[in-house]
Image (cartoon, coloured by chain):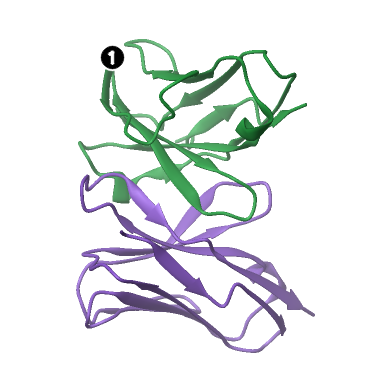
Amino acid sequence: NAGVMQNPRHLVRRRGQEARLRCSPMKGHSHVYWYRQLPEEGLKFMVYLQKENIIDESGMPKERFSAEFPKEGPSILRIQQVVRGDSAAYFCASSPLVGQGTEAFFGQGTRLTVV
Amino acid sequence: GQQLNQSPQSMFIQEGEDVSMNCTSSSIFNTWLWYKQDPGEGPVLLIALYKAGELTSNGRLTAQFGITRKDSFLNISASIPSDVGIYFCAGPNSNSGYALNFGKGTSLLVTP
């Protein structure tokens, strides 16, 4: 049973470009959570999604950031017009049951570098 | 707020030594989680604590849920080089049980 799969593992973007981060949850998991980790910091919650629904995006910046989890395919975290401050590791986690973020499994992350 | 404060920030020890680190908060948590993050990887859950006073072990790791529900500690006995990494405590956000609040981590280095 494969774990949470994130790709790409590393992503370099120039300022102003778009970044698309993908997350495939564990088999049987329909709840996805995105977190951001700045250097020397812990993880910060961004958004919680179920299939085709955004449940809580309270941790996501209001502008340039969006997330989706379509009926088919992976969850996508999209950052438009990236800036240097967006450089961070972005982690996705998934859980099988509603709201069980404490039982979630994390992926290996996507390390975004904005140059 | 629900900030989690971890100490020490970093530790540098010799193989075979025991390690203790802790996590405190000004807010009450109903669950305490301890994660380990290896370089370049995602966090992996080590131990979950659900009850005040609970003491739980996982191999050489032992964690306790403080009686006040505002703290927790993690002990590692007889450390080995593969214990190197960053250890995070975490607890569910009081506004949403699914979002986790993380501490800033304790970085552990073990020399052979």
What shade does chain B have? purple
Residue B31 location, quadrant: bottom left
Residue toward you, B62 or B33: B33
Label 1 secondary element? loop
Closer to us: A17 or A30: A17
Q: How many marks?
A: 1
Residue A58 visible in the displayed image: yes
In percent of the image, x 52 and y 22: which residue is there? A22
Q: Quadrant of the N terminus of chain B?
A: bottom left
**Dot 1 falls on which chain?**
A
Corner quadrant of residue B101: bottom left
| Left-right relation of B35 to A29 | right
Apparent side of residue A6 relative to residue A106 in the rendered image (left or right): right
- Categorize mark 1 by other alpha carbons within 10 Å: few (<14), some (14-19), many (20+): few
User: For chain A, what colour was chosen?
Assistant: green
Residue at x 28% of width, y 81% of height: B66
For this view, does B100 lie left or right of residue A24?
A: left
Can residue A111 be seen here? no
Give, as a three-letter code, the residue at label 1. Answer: Glu
The residue indicated by pointer 1 is A52
The image shows residue A59 at horizontal and vertical percentages of 38, 36
Instruction: Tell me what residue is drawn at x 71 percent, y 19 percent.
Output: A15
* Horizontal side, residue B81 vs residue B97: left or right: right
B25 or B37: nearer the eye? B25
Q: Quadrant of the C terminus of chain B?
A: bottom right
Give residue A30's position: percent from left, percent from top: 29, 27
